[in-house]
Amino acid sequence: MLRKQLAAGVATAQPAKSASSDHKAKAGAPINWQTLAKQLDEMQQAGATADMRVMLRFQQRLQAMTREELIAGLDAIPALELSANSRSMLEQTLIGPLIEIDPEYVLTHFMDSLQDEASGLKWHLPNAMREWAKQEPAKAGAWLDEQIAAGIFDSKSLDGKNPFRVQFEEVMLGILFPADPATAGRRLSAMPQDQRGEVMKRLLGSVKEETQATFTQLVRDQVPANEQTDIFAQQVANQAGKWLEQGGYAKASEYLDRIDATPAERSACALQVAVAGLSTSTAPVTRENIDALRTWIDTQAPDSTNRFTGNILATATQIMPMLDFNDAAALALHYSQASGSDDVLGTFLESWTARNHKDLAMAFIGNIVDESRRSAILKSLQ
């Protein structure tokens, strides 16, 4: 908590300074890092009761530090008599402002922290990569390629993955793909195939409508086909609530048309839209809104409409307290009978919701027409 307070203070505190106070900040005595670490430790221990005046003075002093002072502080830390917690706090307090001033220095001087399990500095390196790539994308990208070639990101894990390689690539691609998709594509193609999908998933939060086509093309060109559906479904899961508020199911349809979704992708995405509709709605579940949902699913994934209806009704009993099990089961029975398919009620009774309401579920099993499916559901509920 204190680290967050200090970071927020550094970012927002802009105290008025006179010429005299500026002179004192620049010409003051050298910083006693041991004392500064002690102050930080005392504020940490005080927590919410810490003297705000002391915190403000600390924030102002931190904000006034030059690049050289921040570097000197980080260099001095190993020799200080500090507890592991105090050492980590001081490192992380100083590294943030230095990243804002000189991210290239942070990367070129602290990359060895990636190999140090005890170091907290390594968690700040992807952010330094982001800040440098914003300023000098070509230079930052070339430097990253040098580190990869030198084996800095080689993995000892059985799956061969290095989570920091994924984070660094995510940063670079997030900067590159909206403005320079060709370079972004080359970067992504240089990654192992089984790691490309993970990188693109991590980028989903930064994809805007105007960059959707570029993002989609990168996925189509570089990510293995069996992972593409999951990426697009996750994108829908992130956006569906907003789409439904803005334009109903039409917004979701526009997205699926825009990415030229395959039948499998439309099916996976339709389920995410349905679940989002329940999760974000405050209206009760009625035949009218289930009918509207089924009508839309029919346009995207007609083979999945009945199965999704059963799935959705089962989910609704868990996230919408106004829909009890018997009401949901009655709706499932209605749609099974109306469609002439066991899929709605069958999927509903095969859910964990039914297993949590075994006594109530048993009353509906006799409505399953297919004998083998009825027997399997009965066995699962006994």
Image (cartoon, rainbow, N blue to C red):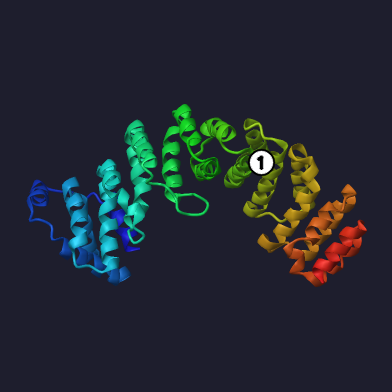
Q: In which quadrant of the rendered view does residue 264 lie? A: top right
What residue do we see at 35% from left, 52% from top?
A: 114
In the visual, does 31 lie left or right of 82?
A: left
- Tag 1: amino acid: Gly
Q: Quadrant of residue 242?
A: top right
Numbered disc 1: secondary structure: loop
Q: Quadrant of the N terminus?
A: bottom left
Q: Looking at the figure, which quarter contains the C terminus?
A: bottom right
Badge 1: how crowded within 10 Å, few (<14), some, or many (20+)? some
Image position of 226 (left or right of 35):
right
Q: Name the spot of residue 153 as percent of width and height, x first.
A: 40, 47
Is residue 51 visible to us here? Answer: no
In the rendered image, is residue 4 in sight? yes
* Point 29% across, 51% down: residue: 96
Residue under numbered circle 1: 248
Q: Position of residue 297 (x, y in %)?
A: 75, 42
